[in-house]
Image (cartoon, grey):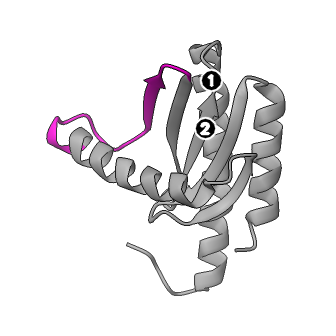
Amino acid sequence: MTAEPEVLGELRRLRARLPQLTGALAASVDGLVLARETSAGEAESVAALTASALGVAQRLTDLTGQGGFRELLVRGEDGYVATYAAGRSAVLTLLAEPRINVGRLHLEARRSSARIGELVDGALARREGPGIRTP
């Protein structure tokens, strides 16, 4: 994907703005790693689990009439896992220390996910070429 360097740059800028992040990952909605800024070696597993969680979250928001999926936050004993919609084709998953300001996490991640969505969806549109439309 031609957007990969730009997506990686956005992940790096996000981690610079939020030093309590321990990892950042952009993945396709079907669970493939697009870019990562993390020391964790299990990026492919996190991307695959993110796709599974995304499916459940989408079903839950549809079933309860809450509209399209926007974000999912999981709090564990040792920190947070947060996933944000990034356009039509990608998701942003962040790992954060337990001491992070969750409001700031949401603010910064929403901005970054919007930018990543633009980059990934734009790259896909260019790859598909003129005259081909994705439903």
The amino acid beneath tag 1 is Leu
Q: Is residue 87 visible?
A: no
Q: Is residue 5 left or right of residue 132?
A: right
Q: Nearer the viewer, residue 50 or 109?
A: 50
Q: Are marks 1 and 2 in contact (CB under 8 Å)?
A: yes
Instruction: Describe the element under mark 1 as helix, strand or loop.
Output: helix
Q: Position of residue 109 (x, y in %)?
A: 63, 33
Q: Nearer the viewer, residue 13 or 79?
A: 79
Q: Say which residue label 2 marks.
A: 94
Please report whichever mark, 1 or 2, sits nearer to the chain's N-terminal start: 2
Q: Residue 129, relative to residue 106: is it above or below?
A: below
Q: Which residues are magenta?
A: 62-78
Q: Name which residue lies at 78% across and 54% down.
A: 8
Question: Residue 68's x, y, as percent?
Answer: 33, 44
Q: Which residue is mark 1?
A: 105
Q: Residues within 10 Å of mark 2 (few under 14, many from 20)?
A: many
* Residue type, label 2: Leu
Q: Quadrant of the C terminus?
A: bottom left
The location of residue 110, given as percent across then percent down, is 59, 34
Residue 69, label in figure: none
